[in-house]
Amino acid sequence: MKTYIFAILLACFTSNLFSQTHELGIFLGGTNFIGDIGSTNYIYPNQFAGGVVYKYNLNPRMALRGNLNYLPIKGDDTASSNQYRNSRGFTFTNTISELAAGIEFNFFDYNIRERTTAYTPYILVQFAGYNSKAPDFVDANNRVFFKNNFSFSIPVGIGFKGRLADNLAFAIEAAARFTFDDNLDYTTEKIDGLNFGGKGKDHYMFTGISLVYTFGRPPCYAERD
């Protein structure tokens, strides 16, 4: 009996080391910006965006997750319900290249190999590094020159995921990126014409759907159909 129990524990241990289920896929959707220019609605996609996603399932409730995203953003005062912004009429575009890593936590046990556990809502918390453009200086001809700006954000989101086929799953997700900067819309006190007066930090949203392919033998917690 002891030998049998030891064999089971050893199988579970080696399975968790070498046979965890992986997920790899694409994420497509839209972005919107929340800052000193444009609409202040949190979910208002106005720019097409995309990326790739990888997940490493630790257990049926938790997965490590990484994203590499290309996220154009746009702000337009004419789309704002704020009367002052609407009459001001400022607009901008920027592009964010983002690398994020964190944890995805499932509300229910999730395993697409079991039809009874093939769907669940989830929450997402990550830490991200991103690169964008920021104003650097203005020359004598009043031309603004930009620089690459690397900074950090904290993506927090909620979604719903489920099974499409034996090894194919989908997810619908909306996640806000809380940044530590106020220059995604080119706001800066160094240049008078770009000082919009806002003091809050900028945020950006990524809302969309992902399609992922799962691979790797299921670990001990997963049962086959």
Image (tube, grey):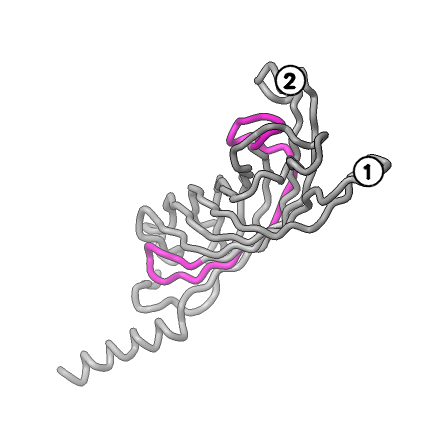
- Residue 86: assigned label: 2
Q: Position of residue 151 (x, y in %)?
A: 57, 51
Sort mark 1 into few (<14), some (14-19) or many (20+) by Cα contacts within 10 Å: few
Apparent side of residue 95 relative to residue 66 in the rendered image (left or right) = right
Q: Position of residue 8 (x, y in %)?
A: 24, 77
Does 2 sit above or below residue 122? below
Does 56 sit above or below residue 140? below
Identify which amino acid the numbered label 1 is placed on.
Arg
Q: Secondary structure at mark 2?
A: helix
Please state which of residues 188 and 59 is positioned toward the viewer in this rendering.
188
Q: Earlier in the sequence, mark 1 or mark 2?
A: 2
Please give the name of the residue rendered at 60% of the width and 14% of the height, measured from the top-left corner: 83
Location of the C terminus (image quadrant): bottom left
Q: Position of residue 196 (x, y in %)?
A: 63, 28
Q: Which residue is mark 1?
A: 143
Asked where in the image residue 182 lies, by quadrant, the reply is: top right
Over which residues does the magenta segment extend? 35-64
Q: Is residue 48 magenta?
A: yes
- Residue 215: assigned label: none
Please give the name of the residue rendered at 60% of the width and 28% of the height, measured from the top-left corner: 197
Please state which of residues 68 and 201 is positioned toward the viewer in this rendering.
201
- Proximity of marks 1 and 2: CB atoms separated by less than 8 Å: no
Determine the residue located farthest toward the bottom in the rendered image.
Answer: 3
Q: Secondary structure at mark 1?
A: loop
Apparent side of residue 131 relative to residue 124 in the rendered image (left or right) = right
Can see residue 213? no
Apparent side of residue 181 relative to residue 220 in the rendered image (left or right) = right
Determine the residue located farthest toward the left in the rendered image.
Answer: 1
Can see residue 171? yes
